[in-house]
Amino acid sequence: MLDVALSFAVILVVFLVLPLIVGQTEHKVMAHMQSRLGPMYAGGFHGWAQLIADGVKFAQKEDVIPAAADRRVFMIAPGVALVPYLVVLIAIPFDRDFVAVDLSLGLFFVLAVMGVGVLGSIMAGWASANKYSVLGGMRSAAQLMSYELPLVLAAASVAMAAGTLSLPGIVEAWQWWWLPWQAVGGVVFFVAGLAELRRPPFDMPIAESEIIMGPMTEYTGMRFALFMLAEYAGIVVLSFLTTVLFLGGWHGPFLPGWLWTLVKVFALAFVVIWLRVTYPRLREDQLQKLAWAVLVPLALFQLALTGVVKVLV
Amino acid sequence: MDGYFGSYVLVAALLALGVAIVAGALFANRLLRPSRPTAEKLTTYECGVDPVGDGWAQSQVRYYVFTYLYVVFAVDAVFLFPWATVFDAPGYGLTTLVEMFVFLGFIALGIVYAWRKRVLSWT
Amino acid sequence: MTEAVPSYLSPTGQEIVFLLLGAVAVGSALLVVTTKQLVHAALWLVLCFGALAGGYLVLTAEFVAWVQVLIYVGAVIVLLLFGIMLTRAPIGRSADLDSRNRPVAALVAVATAAVLVTVVIDAFRTAYTPLTPGGGAASELGASVFATWVLPFEALSVLLLAALIGAIVLSRTDIRGTTQPESPAPTPPRPPTEPSSSAATHGDTVEPPTSSETATSDHGGAVTPPGDRQGGATSDETGGA
């Protein structure tokens, strides 16, 4: 029972604190990449408390629900977008023998549950009764549908290599030479995951210069904050998954396992931020083309490569 | 809390915890926030001008195709997972690998067809 | 299937959970067909599928349960919602969702349910099997599919291919039927199909419904979003949480 309480506590910390750290890192990294300073005031030292101040502000904001909106659906949509990311964390190993629940179908469980999050943005988009929101909701649904496929295929390649669907089992089976072997799958998984998060350069659904904020246009205060938390929790979950599936999780010399996991997660989160600063937004047709004409064939190629190497070698 | 049922009880518990976090955040928000609705505040936001027409407008069919493609392919991809756990086991090997490639080959034909018929390119 | 039937008077935890999930599934399914709001029907269906997945989980069909979530909740519902959005998805109640066939529909539904329940009860009677986890695991399924049921599996790929091609053919706009579609008089004739008009090359233009004021196109509608129109620039405005 103590084990369970401890692992739940770790999950909550990962879910509630790491997204804030990633968000603050994004503020500062983006600022310095663009020759700015970023937040400098809140908390005194380089604006470290900026996101806490944001949170306090969000908590006091009025909750405006447009008169034309479908109230109930509008109100629960942020929860639908957020909760799947929390549930997913239960199957992710942080260290050797440190996972809340070792589900025998862990990988498949994670993919299935993350797929539920798409409903959140469709619900938000439709229930807002705003044309920009509807457009954004449809765009994000189409985008998530298209990128779910390469994500699933790339994940299947790892399952083939490890011969198991349990996430701790996959990390246990990981060898260093999987890095070149599964490299294509890893890139496909990470890029598709980035698109699932609707992060720039895949942020067509919330393209703020043309459809304001997409499905989140009408949201204010706490509900908007929940959507934001979902986005950053999504970054954390994606980084964890890529680490566990492709980068060997806790494997690494010298340092303790949990530290290796964290180092890899933060390196990937940095890449997420870096990509945001570097690339311009993809147009809707380019988005779909990238998914179907590049990522899916690459993922199929990775599947063939994995199968041939595994059976013949 | 071990075994199959124990682990899914924990999953259900975490789900309940997540719902509680969201509900708690919204409840705290309710205690802290002001509520002064006015008619103008509650109108739909369309960049400051009065909203035109309804909040919903008809959209293009091409989204539907991509979703349909995904549904078909997802049904196919699902079979990869049971296969991945057994194809390397003794008694399966090359035959099972070829079986999956035949399966994927048929589906790939579908992608090629879609490609040739320009469904994947934005019209 | 063992014959020893434990008492029904002291249900196990699994049985209670299963019954509750069944009640949720039936209740939400009823809401799907009785709600007056089109999109709500699809959303209630999510709850129904979720309860079904829970039922599979209780029955130790682990893989099937998560397939239910991945395919049905994650994909089929989205497909349904798209379908609704393409035709009409008004907020609020639609008055014309019910037809006068309601009693007939209820009769058919009850009759179907009666047939199914009778068949299941007659087939199994008091047969009892204990819940043993592991039978629904991915490796078990893989073993039986790829050792015993290979041919149906390969036939499935042909079926999926047929469905895929059917969908593509149906959604293409550049195939003209041999007979001209009869167009009712009031609607103005559309220009002969010109799928690559300049407006449509950029993103998802919304086709304005004819004879309506809601002519919003994604770009260049009556409303102009604030800020710059340079879609490519990454902006810091929407930064942190």
Image (cartoon, rainbow, N blue to C red):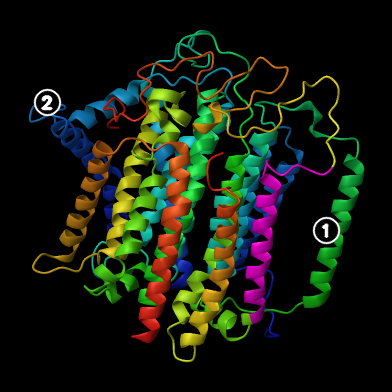
Q: Is residue A256 visible?
A: yes
Q: Percent from the top left, x then y, of residue C235?
A: 28, 27
Q: Is residue B7 above or below residue B122?
A: below
Q: Is residue A219 visible?
A: no
Q: Which mark is residue C211?
A: none
Chain to which the residue tagged by mark 2 belongs: A
Quick check: C36 left or right of A146? right
Residue under the image location 61 percent in, 78 percent down: C130
Q: CA distance from mark 2 to mark 1?
A: 66 Å
**C185 vs A204, nearest the viewer:** C185
| Tag 2 residue | A40
Tell me if mark 2 has few (under 14), some (14-19) or many (20+) residues whose alpha carbon lies within 10 angstroms of its own. Answer: some
**A11 vs C89, nearest the viewer:** C89
Q: Is residue A28 above or below residue C113?
A: above
Residue under the image location 10 percent in, 64 percent down: A255
Tell me the magenta residue range. Answer: C151-178
- Going by the numbered disc 2, the residue's amino acid type is Met
- Going by the numbered disc 1, the residue's amino acid type is Ala
Overall secondary structure of the magenta stretch?
helix
- Secondary structure category for the residue under label 2: loop
Q: Percent from the top left, x then y, of residue C165?
A: 66, 57
Please tell me whether residue C181 belongs to the stretch shown in magenta: no
**Can you say which quadrant of the picture contains the N terminus of chain C?**
bottom right
Number of numbered tags placed on the structure image: 2
**Foreground mark, 2 or 1?**
2
Residue under the image location 81 percent in, 29 percent down: C96
| Tag 1 residue | C113
Q: Quadrant of residue B89?
A: bottom left
Please tell me whether residue C164 belongs to the stretch shown in magenta: yes
Q: Percent from the top left, x then y, of residue A296?
A: 45, 58
**C182 vs A208, nearest the viewer:** C182
Chain to which the residue tagged by mark 1 belongs: C
